[in-house]
Structure formats: C-alpha cells, structure tokens
Image (cartoon, rainbow, N blue to C red):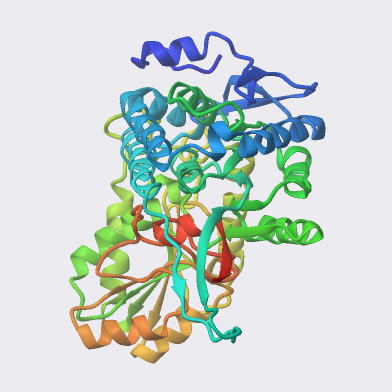
Amino acid sequence: MGLPKNIDLTNRVREFFQNEDKKMLIHGEWVNGNAIEKIAVINPATEEVLGTVPLATPSDVDAAVQSAKQAFYNPAWRKMLPSDREKRLYRLAELIETHADSLAQIITLENGKMFAQARSSDVLGAAETFRYYAGWCSKIEGETLDVSMKQVAGKQNFAFTRREPIGVVAAIVPWNFPISIAAWKLAPALAAGCTVVLKPSEETPLSSLYLGALILEAGFPKGVVNILTGDGVTTGASLVAHPDISKISFTGSTQTGKQIGTAAMRNLTEISLELGGKSPVIVFEDADLNDAAKAITLGIFRNQGQICVAGSRVYVQKKVFDKVMADVALLAGKMRISHGFDPTAELGPLVSARHFQKVSGYVQNGMDEGATLLAGGHRAKEVGFYMQPTIFTATDNQKTIIQEEIFGPVLVGVPFDELQDAIALANDTSFGLASSVWTKNISKAHSMIDQLESGWVFVNAPPRSDPNFPLGGYKQSGFGGKELGKMGLYQYMKTKAVNIVY
C-alpha cells in the first residue's frame, strides 16, 4: 500500500486504508455491485498503489439512478421541511470540519497537492459551501405576476411561479479539487430538494467515498446521495445516457464536455458544463509590479497549475515585460518541490503518469515551435510525477502552448503595446473562463472589464472562488448555467407557472 511511512496520519485515515478494496455507496449501503474490474488508485508522489475501487458497470449505474429516483419521490425527502434539509446540510458542514485533517490527508495521498492547500481550500472550502447552501433551503422563492388574460365578468387571475427540484442529478467531478467541486454540485442540488448520483474521477475517488460516510452520518435518507466509482468510458457514459437522469452537472475538459452534451441531447437532459480555461493575466506598466509577479506565480503554480482558472497566459506591457518575467522566473526558481506532506514544499507532483506525459508533451511542443524557455521544463524527481515550474516567452499568440489548455505548471509570457492590443491578445482564444487585470488606473480597469470575453474578471488579484460568487465561463469554457451563488441553486430547479381563476 502506498501510505507514507513517516507521516503522522490520523487514526481515521489508517482505519480507512485497512481495507484496500473500497466499495461504492448505493442506496445507503457499501457495495461492490456487479463490478468485476477494479481501478487502482495511485499515490502520485510515490507511484505506489493506495487501494482499488470498483469499475461500476451499466447495471450498477442503473441501480444508483433508480435508488436516487426512489429517494426523490419518497416523502421522507420529498416532503422534508426546508428547515430539516437545512439542518442536515449544516450537520454535514460540521462533520467535514471535524474530519478536515483526515479528508485533507486522503486528498493529498491520491491527488498529490499540498496538505495545507487540501485542508484550507478543498476541505474547509467544501464545508463553507455546504453551510452557505444550507441557508438557502428556507429561502427559495417564486413570484406573483400581473397577467393580461381576459376573464368573464366577475372573474380575475391570480398568477404566480413556484420553483421545484429538477429531479435526479448526475454530478461528475474532476480530480483537481475532488471535494470542493463535489460540494459545488451536491450542496445546491440537495438544498433544492434533488437527489444525486455522484461520480468522482477515477484518479481521486477515495476522498469522495470518505465524504459519503459523512453524508450518511449527517442523516440524509437512503438514496439521496449515491456514489459510483469508475471511468468515463464505461461508468460516466452510462450515467449521462441514463433516461432517468434529469440534470447533468459536469466539471472537466471541454472535449469531454462536448461528448456529454451530445449524449444529453438524446434524452433532452438538462446540462451545465464548467469546462476548460486558458485564462489571461494582463499587466500594465502602471501596476504594482511586485504584487503582480507574486500573484502570477501563485496563480499558475498553485496546485501544480492543475486549476481551470489558472492564469496560464500572461500579457505584459512591453516597457516592463522583461522585469515582470524575470521576477516571476526568480520566484518560480525558489519554489521547493516535494511531496504534499512536506510543510516546506510549495509544488507537489502532477496527479498521474498519464497527465505528466501530457504536460511534458506540451513543454516539448513549446520548444519545438520556437518559444523561448525561460525556466524549468524538466522532470524534477526520478520517483513521482514531479515537474519543474516552467516559464516560456513568445510573441506569436497562435503557438499551441498559448492556445490549448495544458493544466500544468506551465506559463507563457507575451508582450503587448497598448490596451487594445492586450484585449485582442487576451480574447484570441476559444476559452473564456477567468482573467485578471493589473493596473492602478480605474478607467483602464473598467475598459478591460467591458471588453474581456471572460466569465470571471479579477482586478489586482488572482482568481479565487467564494460560495456567493458565481462561476461560469464564456465560449467553450462553459454552458448551461453558473455554479455557486443563487444562480448555482436555481440551476437545480425548474419553474412552474400557475394561474388561478377565481
């Protein structure tokens, strides 16, 4: 088993790993289902096997969906008072906080990220999301409407709308933030009164299974949340094609999102897709250049660059281009590379061998296409999927490493002349998820905000999430609605319009 020998793991984590063969959660029970094949979960820091999970079959998918469907219509959930749903979501938030160390340790083991980041961002961020949406359970509203429908003498209309839960939700989450992104989907769906089939990534399923035990402990009825482990080809494809799924919520690559969208259309299933990004950072010469350099470094190398909103393209005004890029390279060169339990480490391993090869391929492509390698570009350790923080500079905005999402610790710097040049370069992409602008000039900042084709715009700060701050992209970075905030709640509800004649 790939547990580190010299790390002080919690007793809960050691108990969790006593049985290396994990099970799925279907209708409140831990089961293997009909799965014959197993998927090995690898510790990316050591390349050792942590354990195995079942590869859920189509029949397992159907069992989970039918469980969720049954729970959706069960009065124990369907007629539960909003205040009682609220109590369960609050209870789950409390349990997540109580188990924060254990959950964060499991995330670090299966994902490779820094333990401190796993605890603060992934786990405690998830607790905040559940707590935020707990408050929405008793605040769902409709509207009264003035309509112009003519009635016979003595009759009149009373028209209103009401919001109802959409039904069974398929929630498919990626491996980069396995618990916080699961919370982005579970919390609003449960607050709305839906039931959920959660499918974590095959790279990082263990933390979701641990979360499943906390969901049961929080008192949610059987079947309200089911958790399937498996891959995209077998498990994921069966789930999104299932006719009893009312809503698909997916976070992941644009390519996979397009495939899910095609499958969803066959059943006219509602979808929301939070997809890839190639987020620009625009630095003007009047910015606080020291703050900008620190934020650029944090924005691209946090979580090894495996963040959809990571600022992977930096456009710097020519006068200060060399200084900013040199400062970023200096900061990157000082980053300590080690496993996620090393308190001095700032950069851990990439999530898997496959992903390491993908990122390495992009680095080689950048060199082949003539970009200038300013720093990094090589494997950092013989064991583990570690890559040096890598920085390129270029002038051709059409280079592959500028146009395609790498999802790794790779930054490309490009100089620009004036504001409109920055706008043209930043918008010259098929993505539109996030962006950040660095300037002390408020008029310049607003001009950028007006013209950037991006769902998120941060000024003088790197992108960060908050439960009350809607997330969703433009172009091929998003489709079908926002996550988080009130918008994130209402995407799990349908609106019924009613007119009473009296």
Residue shown at 47% from the left, 86% from the top: 424
- Residue 227 percent location from the top left of the image: 61, 31
Question: In this figure, what is the number of numbered marks?
Answer: 0
Q: Quadrant of residue 59?
A: top right
Residue 382 against residue 177 in the figure, above or below:
above
Please state which of residues 229 and 481 is positioned toward the viewer in this rendering: 481
Q: Provide residue 137's location: percent of width, then percent of height.
A: 40, 47
**241 lies left or right of 80:** right
> 263 or 444, which is in the foreground?
263
Position of residue 228 relative to residue 459, above or below, is: above
Looking at the picture, tell me which residue is in the foreground, 22 or 426.
Answer: 22
Q: Quadrant of the N terminus?
A: top right
Q: Is residue 306 above or below residue 450?
A: above
Q: Residue furthest front?
A: 154
In this rendering, the answer to whether 51 lies above or below 208 is above
Any part of residue 201 in sight: no
Can residue 490 be seen in the rendering of this structure?
yes
Seen from the viewer's position, the closer of residues 339 and 228 is: 228
The picture quadrant where one finds residue 201 is top right
Image quadrant where one finds the C terminus: bottom right
Q: Is residue 142 left or right of residue 257?
A: left
Tell me residue 35's x, y (percent). Answer: 78, 23
**x and y percent of residue 499 in the render?**
57, 70
Residue visible at 59% across and 26% down in the picture: 222
In the displayed structure, does residue 406 sit left or right of residue 416?
right
Q: Residue at x 47, y 74 (%)?
A: 394
